[in-house]
Amino acid sequence: MVMNQVLRYIEEHLEEPLDIKKIAKVAGYSEYHFIRIFKERTNETVMEYVCRRRLIKSCEDILAGMRIIDVALKYEWKSHSAFSKSFNREFGFSPSLLRTMKLELDCIGGNYMNQIFLNTTKVGMSKEELLAILKETLTKNAIVINETTVNDIYKIACRAYEGQKRYSGEEYVTHPINVAILLAELGADSDTILAGMFCDVSTKGNNNNLENDLPENVWNIVKQLDARESNEAILIKLAERLHNMRTIDFIDESKKAIKAKETIDIYMPLARKINNQKLTDELNDLAFRYNV
């Protein structure tokens, strides 16, 4: 697809001068036609996209220890102040604060990019620990689900995935619980969050009794997952793909590029439609990291 070639070109030339004329030439379109198509496909202008990708990559360099002025010049800003203004406007805090956050997190543990992307959980956490994080996330985002209901759905999910393991060696149920956490971070409704705990049950578990075990509204969403027949099902599949991409290092090397290409071709257009910037940014970042 032409758009994917364009996004790949941008990704590979973020440290070089880029303008619409040059990028439109790669696409094989006139500038006017290209500007319109790009906006339709990505919900942002060409140079807004370029700027945001540069700012996200600059975060990685700052966290790796590069001086802010060197990062600014690397990504085509003319001065420290111009870069800082762009950074603050995009993320709501300064690049120097990002460096400070890194120093604090080095001491207490945590993920440096949680201010840029959706919150993450640590690999290797138990299902019980993840359940606690899910409950905390629900409370933090003012999503009201009766705790007894959460506990009951969790137990049903544990039975559905019983005996299954992830490539990392973790119990498989930790994956759908992570999906539910991401859905809570995305502000999904309660039925969608609970259905997220069965995101992969059709291929990874025994769902013979789910119709009787799950609340009707939750079961109706779960039934739609394979065909992605609803907005709720699409959101669950996006959250599932994000967690799979976060843990992609545990799959065979030969499969990583395939998963990354799937993410670019299938999931990125869906992510742009729901218009959640953090989800879109992280899927984009992970997909191009492995799409070699």
Image (cartoon, rainbow, N blue to C red):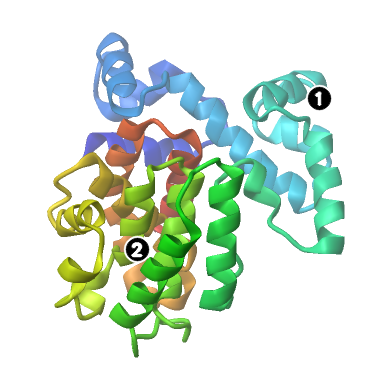
Residue closer to the observer: 91 or 2: 91
User: Is residue 156 depicted above or below 137 in this figure?
Assistant: below
According to the image, label 2 marks what residue? 257
The image quadrant that residue 232 belongs to is: top left
User: Which structural element holds mark 2?
Assistant: helix
Residue closer to the observer: 290 or 28: 290
Q: Earlier in the sequence, mark 1 or mark 2?
A: 1
- Which residue is at 81% across, 47% downward? 101
Q: Is residue 289 visible?
A: no
The image quadrant that residue 45 belongs to is: top left
Q: Hey, what amino acid is under mark 2?
A: Ala
User: Which structural element holds mark 1?
Assistant: helix
Single out the residue that lies furthest toward the bottom. 163
Single out the residue that lies furthest toward the top. 32
Residue closer to the observer: 283 or 275: 275
According to the image, label 1 marks what residue? 80
Q: Hey, what amino acid is under mark 1?
A: His
Q: Count the numbered circles shown.
A: 2
Find the distance from the CA under tag 1 to the CA under tag 2.
36 Å
Position of residue 213 measured from the top left corner of the image (x, y, whole percent): 23, 70
User: Is residue 14 depicted above or below 138 in this figure?
Assistant: above
